[in-house]
């Protein structure tokens, strides 16, 4: 319930209140050693940091989600984190890693969760166009193919390190 409130406060740009609630959730779920809830807290932290364009912090939070979800075989959280990480990677100038990870994340999502929404498909299309304009159409196409060919373990490595 509190995490939903964090999301609402973030949407309202009441970041200080959202951050305070997140800290309380982190402490509480940490004391309980509730990894599933800590994954949700890390995901919401990434959302809050992205909303404020704190890209380094958003990347760190997303990587925490990946690490915890990978260790716990939390498929939905892993798919969500792999989908969310390209935004901070792009903002931090890591276009190649972002393109490869997006390609993998799209396929992983579609195979394990279902089709992308129209909104999400639009995000992918916009990112692909931006990458092509920055790196050239052929390089973007190559990166997309490389990402699609990654194993899950390779994608996790890429998400955690920006390399792989």
Image (cartoon, rainbow, N blue to C red):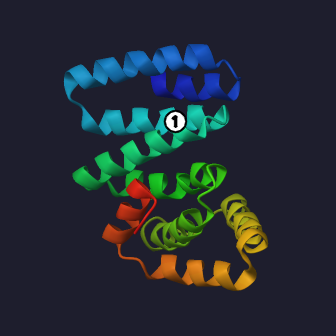
Residue 27 screen position, x and y as percent: 32, 18
Quadrant of res 125: bottom right
Q: Nearer the viewer, residue 127 or 13?
A: 127
Q: Callout 1: 10 Å neighbours few (<14), some, many (20+)? A: some
Residue 123 screen position, x and y as percent: 70, 60
**Residue 154 falls left or right of residue 133:** left
Q: Nearer the viewer, residue 135 or 84?
A: 135
Q: Secondary structure at mark 1?
A: helix
Residue shown at 52% from the left, 36% from the top: 57
Q: Which residue is mark 1?
A: 57
Residue shown at 40% from the left, 67% from the top: 155
**Residue 146 falls left or right of residue 112:** right
Vertical relation: 146 (above or below) 130: below
Vertical relation: 65 (above or below) 15: below
Q: Is residue 102 visible?
A: yes
**Residue 65 falls left or right of residue 80:** left
Q: Quadrant of the C terminus?
A: bottom left
Vertical relation: 112 (above or below) 84: below
Quadrant of res 32: top left
């Amino acid at each position: 319930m509190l995490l939903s409130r964090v999301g609402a406060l973030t949407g309202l740009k009441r970041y200080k209140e959202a951050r305070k609630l997140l800290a309380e959730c982190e402490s509480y779920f940490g004391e309980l050693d509730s990894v599933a809830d800590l994954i949700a807290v890390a995901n919401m932290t990434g959302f809050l940091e992205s909303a404020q364009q704190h890209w380094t912090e958003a990347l760190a939070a997303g990587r925490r989600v990946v690490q915890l979800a990978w260790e716990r075989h939390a498929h939905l959280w892993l798919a969500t984190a792999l989908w969310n990480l390209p935004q901070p990677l792009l903002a931090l100038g890591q276009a190649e890693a972002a393109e490869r990870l997006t390609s993998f994340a799209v396929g992983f999502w579609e195979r394990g969760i279902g089709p992308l929404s129209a909104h999400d498909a639009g995000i992918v299309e916009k990112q692909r166009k931006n990458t092509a304009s920055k790196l050239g159409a052929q390089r973007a196409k190559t990166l997309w193919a490389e990402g699609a060919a990654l194993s899950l373990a390779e994608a996790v490595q890429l998400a955690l390190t920006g390399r792989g």
